[in-house]
Amino acid sequence: MEGPTPVSALIHAATLVTAGVFLIIRSSIIFENSHVLSVITIFGALTAFFASSVGLVQNDLKRVIAYSTCSQLGYMVFAAGLSHYSIAFFHLANHALFKALLFLSAGCVIHGVSDEQDMRKMGSMIKLFPISYTMILIGSLALVGFPFLTGFYSKDAILEVALSKHTMTGNFAHLLGCLAAFCTSFYSFRLVYLAFVNDTNTYKKYIDHAHDAPILMVFPLLFLSLGAIF
């Protein structure tokens, strides 16, 4: 995850990594007339759970968000595997907004503490980064599916359609989807706690030179935060 953060945001949120899901959605008629939908569902559910479990133990700020992307792609894929392509696309669009918000806000924090990415070497950043903290909190709440934020509507719909299938693959996807949702909540709030709430664990010179994002960087964050809320 060494690339510039805006590049990371574009890759993870809306373009490169979601292209495969978009291809499945656009090729839905081919998949509907084949016998691989249950395979897609199983692999999507496994991906959602596996990636979220890996995210639990990452200490790099951007890496946690990156594994979160992989996990959410699993949700989209198993929704497509259950023949609910519109819901998969709905989650893709919602995810683009809150994931770009998380990556760009993380970039503001990393830039403000002299390019430090290890969350264990941060802490007590609320006073130093009030805007970035607010944006990361909004993005995290949308990601975990907090009621009435964008992520809630699409993630809830995906889990509901999995349960309503009444098949082995549907129940399997629902179970792993729920476990992945639990892991997502855990690593999202672990990120917020370690970076912003925990006791300061960084160098004094980093704290002395720490600064929140300038207005030019805040401007796109405001647009994305509105998308993540509404």
Image (cartoon, grey):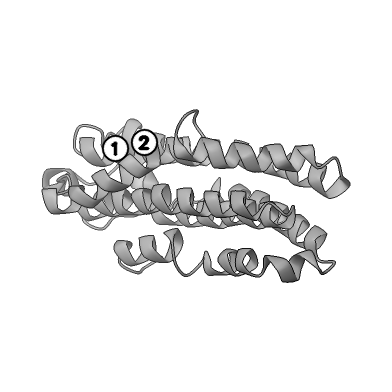
Relative to the observer, which residue lies in front, 225 or 51? 225
Q: Residue at 56%, 57% (x, y): give it.
A: 70
Q: Count all numbered tags in the image, as a single digit.
A: 2
Tell me whether the residue at label 1 lies in contact with that at label 2, contact meaning CB atoms closer than 8 angstroms: yes
In the rendered image, the residue lying farthest to the top is: 147
Q: Quadrant of residue 161?
A: top right
Q: Is residue 122 shown to the viewer in this render?
A: no
Q: Quadrant of residue 159?
A: top right
Q: Is residue 16 left or right of residue 159?
A: left
| Residue at disc 1, secondary structure | helix
Q: Which residue is mark 2?
A: 137
Asked if 107 appears above or below 152 in the picture, the reply is below
Q: Position of residue 187 (x, y in %)?
A: 51, 41
Distance Cα–Cα, label 1 vs label 2: 6 Å
Which quadrant would the N terminus be assigned to in this image?
A: bottom left
Q: Amino acid at mark 2?
A: Leu
Q: Position of residue 126 (x, y in %)?
A: 25, 33
Q: Residue at 53%, 69% (x, y): give it.
A: 19
Q: Residue at 38%, 37% (x, y): give it.
A: 230
Q: Position of residue 41 (x, y in %)?
A: 75, 56
Q: Amino acid at mark 1?
A: Tyr
Q: Is residue 195 left or right of residue 39?
A: left
Q: Is residue 159 left or right of residue 153?
A: right
Q: Is residue 78 shown to the viewer in this render?
A: yes
Q: Position of residue 222 (x, y in %)?
A: 25, 44
Q: Which residue is mark 1?
A: 133
Bin the neighbour count of mark 2 within 10 Å (Cα to Cα): few under 14, some 14-19, many 20 and up: some
Bin the neighbour count of mark 1 within 10 Å (Cα to Cα): few under 14, some 14-19, many 20 and up: many
